[in-house]
Image (tube, helix red, strand yellow):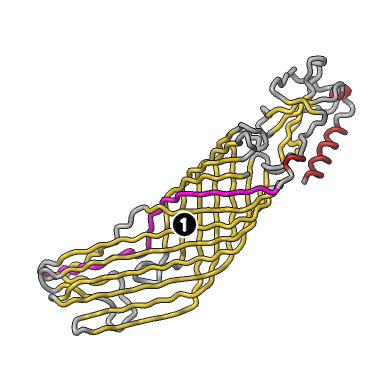
Amino acid sequence: MRTNGFVGLIIAGICCLPSQALYSQSDFPVEPSNESEGVFRISNASDDFESNVDAVSFAPASPRTSDLAPIAMPDNYGNEEYYGPVEEYTQGDWIEDPYLDDTSYERLGIVAGAAAVFLKPGFDTDTAFFTEDQSGMTTITTSNDFPYNYQTAPRINLGVIDNEGLSAQVRWFQLEDNSSNGATSPNNFIFFNGLPTQTVTGGLRAGGQAGDFISTSSNLKLYTIDVDMSQELNFERWQTTFGGGYRHASVSQTYRAVGTASGAPVSSDVGHRFDGNGLVIFGEARRPLGLFDRRSKGTSSVSLISSVKYSALWGRSKYSAEDRTPGPTVAVAQTDNKKSLSIVELQVGAQADFVLQTGALVWVRAAWDGMWWNGAGSAASESGDLSLLGGSITLGMDW
């Protein structure tokens, strides 16, 4: 990476040989560029010579390297026909070569982040129980859903990163949520559990007389653990990251309904869980709204960011159900099957970067987050998809 940058600078220097004015001095000021494409500008402006000014913009090969390559230069650069405006860079550090000292950036650093994610679960079918009104000429059936709310979930990453933006990290995310719903029956009302179970009785049937009731609850637990590698790449002003690796994921859901049928107790308990392993791939793009030098202490920048992540998982799904009806009669069902599941994650937001005087890069990100667990099911069923929508606030550090 550094060899390519050095060769680029040699080529740029050879192109400038016809212009003796450019080499009338041995020092060059290095400054943040005003060019829309560049990150640095190197100019031959000086107090001794102000008639012929040439400048060329440079960008680093990655946010952490000091290798520079020319990406924009003025017309007629390298000959005596170009006469640009006289510009003095009073804030620059004078150096003997038109590239930066890169020895201080040879390192293996630490990258870490912690996020508070606010998500609300959504399901293809989110029914807590059905109500059947038999008081009129026709029977009216209504669905009563679980009132899920936003929950806070942690997301943490920790790893190492080298000078060229190659990183190895471990990432962990976990979410837990629960909800409940219930009702008391007037005359001629019948209650059913949210979805039929796989037992012979097919779940719970409550109600039948005034005072009968139904009470339902659900619980959702899921987590992911990733071990991956990624590489940072720059394309003009775009900063991108691509990577992939291994993922382990687990999602478990439970459903419970209790009530009375003509005064007799009834209940239904359902639970299913998926544990799987597979591959994960991801990509992220950052577009700084202004020029940003990763290596200049005390600088800051704001960027727009977007990312997408996809994982394919293979594992086993276990299901169990127990229904109790008057009698009492107890019916049980259990299954254990192979299953595949995929997860899609999207993020769109803004990120503020701050380079501390110690050289550490600290960043804060606010974003909209969306996750889709295809095939995760709902509280009472293995079928259907689970969506998690909300936002996140992330604090990260690259040292």
Q: Nearer the viewer, residue 187 or 397?
A: 397
What span is colored magenta in the figure?
108-135
Residue at 58% across, 33% down: 300
Q: Nearer the viewer, residue 8 or 230?
A: 230
Other residues around mark 1 within 10 Å, as few (<14) / some (14–19) / many (≥20) = many
Is residue 82 one of those drawn in magenta? Answer: no
The image shows residue 372, relative to residue 289, as above or below, that is below
Residue at 32% across, 76% down: 197
* Residue 96 falls left or right of residue 58: right
- The residue where tag 1 is placed is 371
Is residue 127 one of those drawn in magenta? Answer: yes
Residue at 71% across, 39% down: 60
The answer to whether any part of residue 137 appears in the image is: no
SS at circle 1: strand
x, y percentage for residue 270? 33, 73
x, y percentage for residue 227? 59, 60
x, y percentage for residue 356? 60, 35
x, y percentage for residue 89? 71, 21
Q: Amino acid at mark 1?
A: Met
Q: Quadrant of residue 226?
A: bottom right
